[in-house]
Amino acid sequence: QVQLVESGGGLVQAGGSLRLSCAASGSIYSINAMGWYRQAPGKQRELVASITSSGSTNYADSVKGRFTCSRDNAKNTVYLEMNSLKPEDTAVYYCNVNVVTYTLTLANYWGQGTQVTVSS
């Protein structure tokens, strides 16, 4: 089993910054892609950013230039640095990790979600 623990959400004014973290632990042989999704009230969950094991990143158009996704492979942790936040960034943010377990099973896990609220 794999556990994901998210932290770093909160309330911030427009133009401010937040940094989210998601640490994976448990039966992990290796981690492939890691990423962040978000879901605003009444909307579908959407991809915000992802990062491959080699460090290649992908971003939603709405966050390009403002958000940075990074990872620390030694700590099995993925980060999302969010700058120039806008009220429309308000959502619950979920980390997502694609893992190869010690039984060499490929599995996908979600964090518990962390609320990000941006006030205007």
Image (cartoon, rainbow, N blue to C red):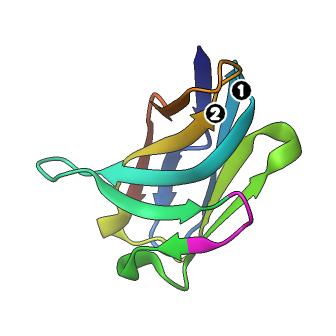
Residue 119 in view: no
Percent coordinates x, y for residue 69 in the rendering = 63, 64
Q: Is residue 30 above or below residue 13?
A: above
Q: Is residue 111 magenta?
A: no
Q: Residue furthest right?
A: 74
Which residue is found at the position 72% from the left and 67% from the top?
55
Residue 100 circle label: 2
- Residues at discs 2 and 1 in contact (Cβ within 8 Å): yes
Q: Is residue 61 above or below residue 1?
A: below
Q: Tell whether 56 sits left or right of 42.
A: right
Q: Tell whether 91 sits left or right of 11.
A: left
Q: Quadrant of residue 119?
A: bottom left
Q: Residue furthest bottom?
A: 65
Percent coordinates x, y for residue 101 in the rendering = 65, 25
Q: Nearer the viewer, residue 98 or 45?
A: 98
Q: Nearer the viewer, residue 24 or 18?
A: 24
Residue placed under numbered mark 1 in the picture: 28
Which residue is found at the position 55% from the left and 41% from the top?
97
Q: Which residues are magenta?
A: 53-57
Q: How many other residues sit within 10 Å of disc 1, few (<14), some (14-19) or many (≥20)?
A: some
Prevailing secondary structure of the magenta residues: loop
